[in-house]
Amino acid sequence: MCADFYPSGSKYIYDLYYEKEAISRQLYEWLLKNNYADKNLIAKWKKQGYEKVCYLLTTLSHFIR
């Protein structure tokens, strides 16, 4: 489930670099190199529409329980 990955820090680092532009590329690459974020997961978030799918799946999972 997409929501399971959010606590890992990957989403936070993704937002800092791509959305808020609050960290440098050098720091971003260092974080990826030292496994503070999952680069494969971030690659998926960069694809258009992926966050919408995750949001939808997370929302639907609450109704199924």
Image (cartoon, helix red, strand yellow):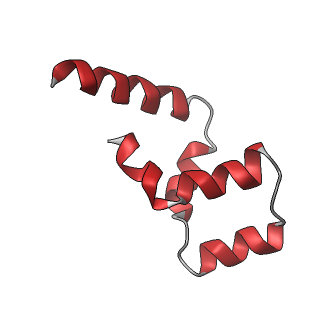
Instruction: Classify residue 28 as left or right of residue 55.
Output: right
Q: Position of residue 59 (x, y in %)?
A: 36, 23
* Residue placed furthest toward the bottom: 34
Asked if 2 appears above or below 36 in the picture, the reply is above
Q: Quadrant of the C terminus?
A: top left
Counting every numbered tag in the picture gives 0
* Residue placed furthest toward the left: 65
Q: Quadrant of residue 45?
A: top right
Instruction: Classify residue 16 as left or right of residue 44.
Output: right
Asked if 45 appears above or below 65 in the picture, the reply is below
Q: Position of residue 58 (x, y in %)?
A: 35, 30
Looking at the image, which residue is at 53% across and 34% down?
Answer: 50
Viewer-side residue, 1 vs 49: 1
Looking at the image, which residue is at 82% across and 55% down?
Answer: 22
Q: Quadrant of residue 55?
A: top left
Q: Position of residue 47 (x, y in %)?
A: 61, 39
Viewer-side residue, 33 vs 16: 16
Looking at the image, which residue is at 64% across and 73% down?
Answer: 31
Looking at the image, which residue is at 52% across and 26% down?
Answer: 52
Instruction: Classify residue 1 as left or right of residue 15.
Output: left
Asked if 37 appears above or below 26 in the picture, the reply is above
Q: Quadrant of the N terminus?
A: top left
Q: Position of residue 21 (x, y in %)?
A: 83, 51
